Amino acid sequence: MPSFDIVSKTDLAEVENAVQGVTREIGTRFDFKGSHCTVERKEALITINADDDQKLRQVQDLLKVYITRRKLDAGCLEFKDEQKASGNSRRQEVVVKQGIDQTLAKRIVKDIKDSKLKVQVSIQGDELRVTGKKRDELQEAIAFVKGLKIEQPLQFVNFRD
């Protein structure tokens, strides 16, 4: 029976390259001269430290641009609430999304079942397995899921006949 998996994986090596690019640009740009702006990554968590709100917004934009340049979807970044740090500086944590959480998985399963497509969807940990009798039905399911307004980037992998 043909099947495929819906996953959401982000290449952390490319994220690290993007963070290093942002750090290099902060060091060379004139408007960041003398500021104490930093971007650090630990596993799937990026921490931005900036002098003020304006510099924090600029670093956020730089991070999105560099993520996009590395051929990743900027939707994989989840910006948490900014916090006040020492003095007048700001700190913000950015989570790199990995895997499909339960609420999103249940929403996708419900939407596929409501569409009356002749496929079965099962949740397997942080990914979804879609099975059907024909390859065409699976391709319709892929097109349907791509048509949903989901902010998180999804990949369709492990296509088997």
Image (spheres, rainbow, N blue to C red):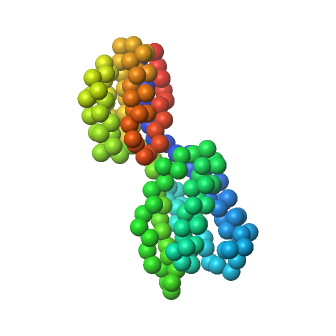
Residue at (39, 41) in percent of width and height = 149
Q: Which quadrant, please, contains the N terminus? A: top left
Give coordinates of residue 11: x percent, y percent: 56, 45
Query: Looking at this view, is 111 or 37 the one in front?
Result: 111
Residue that sits furthest to the bottom in the current view: 87
**Is residue 114 among the parts visible in the rendering?**
yes
Give above or below for 150 relative to 83. above
Residue at (64, 78) in percent of width and height = 35
Give coordinates of residue 126: x percent, y percent: 38, 41
**Is residue 3 among the parts visible in the rendering?**
no
Give coordinates of residue 47: x percent, y percent: 52, 66
Give above or below for 23 relative to 114. below
Q: Is residue 57 left or right of residue 105?
A: right
Residue at (58, 67) in percent of width and height = 58
Query: Looking at this view, is 15 or 77 the one in front?
Result: 77
Give coordinates of residue 133: x percent, y percent: 36, 13
Q: Is residue 70 left or right of residue 145?
A: right
How many dots with numbers?
0
Residue at (57, 61) in percent of width and height = 61
Snapshot quadrant of residue 41? bottom right
Give above or below for 24 relative to 89. above
